Image: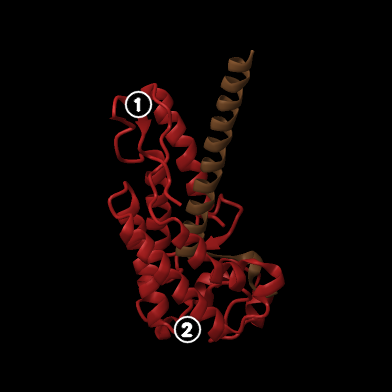
Amino acid sequence: MILSVAVIAGILSGFLVARWKKEPWQPPALRHAWLVVVFFLPQLLAFYLPATRNLFSAPLAAASLVISQLGLLAFCILNWRLAGMPILAIGLLLNLAVILANGGLMPVSPDAVARLVSPEVLARLQVGERLGTSKDILLAPDAIIFPWLADRFAPPDWIPYRFAFSVGDILIGLGAFILLAFPAGKAASIKKGNLSYVNQPNF
Amino acid sequence: MKNTTAYFASVVSKIQKQHIQFVLLVLVVLMLVLGAGAPVDGGGIGH
């Protein structure tokens, strides 16, 4: 959920930039947005909806995650020319690479988890198991393939909300911010003598 | 009067369409970001 901060910040920045330029804010002209809705659905069921996420075994959750991210990657490629989208796509690709290399879930080491939970909770966790209903799996550091792409970073201590994130997550947040704050493309075009906006999302 | 009503209806329908498009855009980008990312927080661990 921490990544939603990048979306909110991007929209607010986009409005501020537009106001500074004395232009209306233009949303990015997303193409094939239905792909996002369709391919987010497996993750919605496997990780987010309380009514369904407990029904997913680790292998089924892993399959849902991989299929979903492949579809989302296709959407990113189809929208490659939008500002921020290449950064977001590379972030997604990095996450997908480490997820695929480690069996379908995002690896996280006990050291990283120790920064998120109490020692009592950490003692109850077993290496090799999915962490609750999250996308992460607890693995020993030397068992993680591409460890530098795993969830290994934590926010500064002065931030009370504790979470671990990956290099890919950073790029995804940055890409989403740029996508919304600095949407590319002409603000408007003149078609047949009428002023019409071209940056309308294509659903 | 009829023209005024038609103009008002046109303006209202345009505003509503833009609002709906904005909400849909935000939802799509949120789904994209949540689906692409994989951070983990302490809240969901150990439950």
| Residue A175 placement (x, y as % from top left) | 37, 51
Q: Is residue A135 above or below residue A101?
A: above
Q: The brown chain is which one?
A: B
Q: Name the residue under label 2.
A: A140
Q: Is residue A60 above or below residue B10?
A: below
Quarter of the view holding residue B36:
bottom left
| Residue B31 placement (x, y as % from top left) | 51, 58
Query: Is the N terminus of chain A in the top left, top right, bottom left or bottom right quadrant?
Result: bottom right
Q: Mark 1 points at which residue?
A: A195
- Amino acid type for the residue under numbered disc 2: Ala
Q: Which tint is chain A?
A: red
Q: Can residue A167 be seen in this view?
A: no
Q: Residue at x 48, y 52 (%)?
A: B29
- Amino acid type for the residue under numbered disc 1: Leu
| Residue B6 placement (x, y as % from top left) | 59, 22
Q: In this view, does B33 lie above or below A96?
A: above
Marks 2, 1: nearer the viewer: 1
Q: Of helix, strand and loop, which one carries label 2?
A: loop
Is A140 displayed left or right of B13 in the figure? left
